[in-house]
Image (cartoon, rainbow, N blue to C red):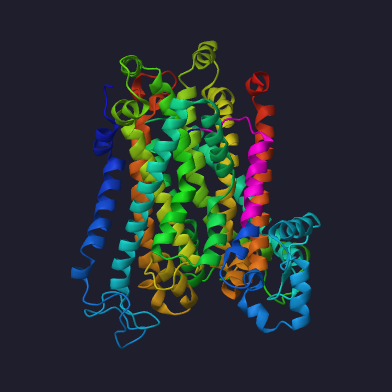
Amino acid sequence: MHTNPLMDVLRDPLGKAGIILLAAITLMAVFAPFLSDYSPNQYTGEIFSRPSAEHPLGTDSVGQDIWSRLLWGARTSLAVGAAVALISTICSIFIGATSAIFGGLYDRFWMRIVDAMLAIPAIIVMILVAAYLRPDLLILVLLLSAFSWPPGARILRAQTLSLKERMHVSAAATFGAGWSHILKRHIIPDLSPIIVAVMIADCRRAIFMEAGLSFLGVSDPTMVSWGKIMHQSLQFTYLDVWQWWLVPAGIALSLTLVGLSLIGFSLESAMDPRLASRPRKEIGGGSDA
Amino acid sequence: MNASRPPHGNFINYLLALVAIFSLNFILPRMMPGDPLHAIYGDEALVAMTPQMEAYLTEKFALNQPWSSQFTAYASGLLQGDLGYSYYYKDQVSTVIMGALPWTLLLAGLALIIATILGTALGIESGYRRGRPLDRGLIASLMFLSGFPDFFVGILLLLIFGVCLGVAPLSGATTPYSGATGLAYALDVAHHLILPLSALVLVQLGGIYLLTRNTMVSVLKERFIMTARAKGCSDSRIRYEHAGRNSLLPVVTATGMRLPQIITGALFIEIVFSYPGVGSLLSSSLDARDYPLIQGILLLVTVAVLTANLGVDLLYRRLDPRVRYAH
């Protein structure tokens, strides 16, 4: 490997922009208690107050401080995203890599499941399950993870299949290394940029789905979430409140998703060999009509 | 990642997916604590239910019998197209859904067509000018846009054009009680459709654009492009007929994967605009906890997505002879 795609992301302007966006949201989430005087579920005494020094974004229809709900919403989104990315990527690595290593019936079994799950629109099943269970944060994370591992497993399996044929892996196998040693020492380190890409995609999907479910109003009612803020405030578009209630929540959610997309896109372009060469040297790319 | 799905769209995957959805629909309400009839119909429905009706329904779902006969009763009902009864709309679930379906098909279908045409055209132009200002500008702006959740793009359009500027209607698909017919009716529908449609297209555009652009970049490196150039083909001919045409294949495959996004995107955007399609129906059934309707809608959407995916797989085989020979 002559290039490190993870380093390329830091140099790419789009990747940099994504990292800055995500860092800003993370800071908001981490320092939420210091950035606001109110707890997100606290009744402040006035409803629909306009933005003021006391309440930077005013208060909502039940008298909660919108700014602090926004900050705590960042915590929910990032926690869901990070947890799902972790759990689902671990499943993807394990299932994808072991399928590639073992092959045979084991591989066929898992790939059949992956194909079937990829055919089902996950958000639809999530809505159905959530409508019955009204999941809290933990169940939501587990549900989202259960539906987000298949794409990653397929990608990681394909990569492992090609890595498996490399010399150093054969060498390790010849020296008597077991599959778990090969996986840990030789496959996973080489997969790391792709694993990061899979994690980013999983994280983005999880944040989007959590917001979508909350926007539909099927998540746990006590959860503070950007999707739920949008669900509540959408009923009040005839008042001026959308300016500091609906729009900030939507922007926060969008910037988080855009940040993750930018990092993911920049990472994938850095890894894609088809896009690797310099633009000036290629045939056909030079002249213009 | 442009990992296009392997084209062997064998029926078994779709069949498995379908069985999984049916089973989930069957198991979920019966897994809930308490009386399964409560879970199947929801607590609100049972308030209005007479003991005779409860006995009838218990008999119908075979709830007093073992799981195997319950499943047989469920499956035979589905096979007859019986999705259950919506107590909220006081009608058969299938009738309720069919009333809303045309609006969703109009919205999602048009969005798919427009986004595909626009996305491919932009992708071809952009890939041809790789690294130039137009290419960089398009990538940055479309990446930014496609990162937005579809319902928020809808909300933004609604707020800008509907609430602030007042140039577009805030909700619905037609002006109520206008009595318009013919051309006036079509214009009215278009006027109501434009915002939800733009929102859906704007969000979907990025993925199609990016895929075409990246394929274009790699196709332009192929030898036959050099041959075409050496023959003296014009730039626009090379761009569209040689390179552009070859960039279409992955777009077709990706359409299959994009369909679920377009359909679910349409559902969410309908909710924003109170567009009277399946999405708004889903939203009100979720609010009213009308479980038979929720199940019916989600079943229908899944079947639609699976069927469309199968169709795309078959189409792909026709488009790419290599796949046909390989099997």
Residue B156: x, y in percent? 45, 63
Q: For the N terminus of chain A, which image quadrant?
A: top left
**Residue A109 position by quadrant:** top right
User: Does residue A244 appear to the left or right of B264 in the view shown?
Assistant: left
User: Does residue B106 appear to the left or right of A6 in the view shown?
Assistant: right
Task: Residue at the far bottom: name it.
Answer: A45
Task: Residue at the far left: name it.
Answer: A34
Task: Residue at the far right: name it.
Answer: B80
User: Does residue B204 appear to the left or right of B317 in the view shown?
Assistant: left
Residue B301: x, y in percent? 64, 54
Which residue corresponds to the image point at 39% horizontal and 63% vertical from the top-left? Answer: A137
Residue B37: x, y in percent? 67, 72
Figure check: B76 above or below B37: above
Which residue corresponds to the image point at 25% horizontal and 49% vertical from the top-left? Answer: A20
Check residue B124 for magenta coloring. no
The stretch in magenta equals: B4-24
- Magenta span main SS: helix
Check residue B17 for magenta coloring. yes
Which residue corresponds to the image point at 59% horizontal and 46% vertical from the top-left? Answer: B259
Task: Using the image as rendered, state which of residue B201 and residue B190 is in the foreground.
Answer: B201
Figure check: A76 above or below A168: below
Task: Using the image as rendered, state which of residue A243 and residue B323 is in the foreground.
Answer: B323
Report whether residue B1 is seen.
no
Residue A128: x, y in percent? 57, 61
Task: Using the image as rendered, state which of residue B133 and residue A126 is in the foreground.
Answer: A126
Task: Residue at the far front: name it.
Answer: B66
Figure check: B71 above or below A232: above
Figure check: A167 above or below B192: above
**Residue A288 position by quadrant:** top left
| Count of marks overlaid on the render | 0
Report whether residue A11 is seen.
yes
